[in-house]
Every structure is written in C-alpha cells, then in structure tokens.
Amino acid sequence: MAVIEYFYAGYSAFAYIGHAELLRIAKKSGREIAHRPFDLRKLVTTTGAQPVASRTQAHKEYFFGREIERWAEYRNIPVMKGTPTHHAHDITLSNCLLIAGLVQGLNIDMLSLEMLRAHWVDDFDLDNPEDLKKICARAEVDPAPLLSAALSDEVHALYDANTEEAIRRSAFGSPTYFIDGDMFYGQDHLELIAHTLKV
C-alpha cells in the first residue's frame, strides 16, 4: 500500500494541530501513515535556524503563540494557552515510546494523537513515565511493554536512523510529510497534500 511518510516529534505543536487532518487525508486517500518520530532538536541545529532560546520575544509570542492559537481555531481543536510547563524536558523517551509501538506491530495513529493532545491540551510531561502510562491508557494500549522497549538499543537505533534520515532528506522541522518522495513541510501544507492526493 502507498504511504504518507510522517516525520515528527511527539511534543510538536504543529504536528498536533495537523494530526487529525492527516488521519482524515490518509483514510480518504487509502494510504497508510509511515510514522517517523525523530529528534527535532538535533535536526534544528542542522538547518541554520536560530535556536528558539535566542529568538526575539515577539517572534516566540507570534510563532509559538498566536500561530498555534489561530491554526487550532481553524482546525477546530482545543489547545492550551501558552507553552506546556514541561516542554523543555527531554523528548527521547516519548519519541522512543512511539517507535516501540511500531516495533511491536501496533498502529500508532491514535497513540501519537493522544500523546500530542495530552501535551498541548492537558499539560502532560512527556518525559514522565507515569504521564506516558496515562497516554497509553487513553489510546487503549498496554504501556508496560512499550516503556520497556523504549529503553532498548534497537529502538534507540531506529530513533537515530529516523533523525539522520530527516536530516539527509532536508526536512526543516516537525511535521514534515513526504508523498512519493515529494516533501511538504508544515501542517499548513496539508491542504496541498489533499489536493495532490485528490481527496
């Protein structure tokens, strides 16, 4: 089956905003989503983009504030005011939890949605195993094997490979989608993806 390649980080605001629409497009087009959770922070250091911490307050308030609010309203989804309390925490465990689901043969469409939503609506800490257990419960998957596998060398190797692939293919951030090798950066390009796939 043809796929939509989906490079994203499990804490990404714009991945959250576009996720439900991506699921709709995939279902309507008959394509599977090939999830590629990756280390967004590492990728950003390779793109020439200014680190978030050194950007102006006005830029941060617009791009990570007003733009998030505007797009959430447009997509008719809830989003918390401001940045999640634990947004600066390590993102490895959460991304690797998603990869562990893939390794174990799960369809992680809903698990990734619940993770993104828990962070951006309910202020969950994605580096806290207890919060990750709650996310798994919401997605109706057993957290124990996923949390165990998330710490494995196999899963970490896949995480590194996803990150290196995103860098090699010149992804700019999260989310980045590929349709038959053609890159679409940002959830604001989902309408163009729908147009491309004629759905």
Image (tube, helix red, strand yellow):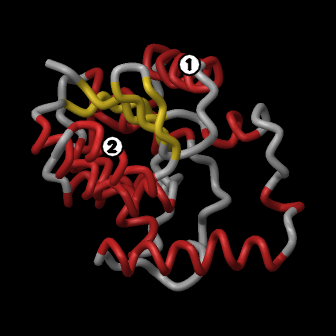
Name, please, the residue furthest toward the bottom.
81
Residue 199 visible at all:
yes
Q: Residue at x 26, y 44 (%)?
A: 143
Percent of width and height locating residue 79: 42, 78
Q: Nearer the viewer, residue 194 or 39?
A: 194
Q: Is residue 24 above or below residue 17?
A: above
Check the picture and name the quadrant holding the N terminus.
top left
Percent of width and height locating residue 122: 39, 75
Left or right of 31 on screen, residue 64: right
Which residue is tagged 1? 165
Q: Residue at x 33, y 43 (%)?
A: 193
Q: CA distance from mark 2 to mark 1?
A: 21 Å
Left or right of 51 on screen, residue 185: left
Which residue is tagged 2? 193
Q: Residue at x 40, y 75 (%)?
A: 72
Residue 131 visible at all:
no
Amino acid under label 1? Glu
Amino acid under label 2? Ile
Q: Which element carries disc 1, helix, strand or loop?
A: helix
Give the number of callouts.
Answer: 2
Q: Nearer the viewer, residue 69 or 74?
A: 74
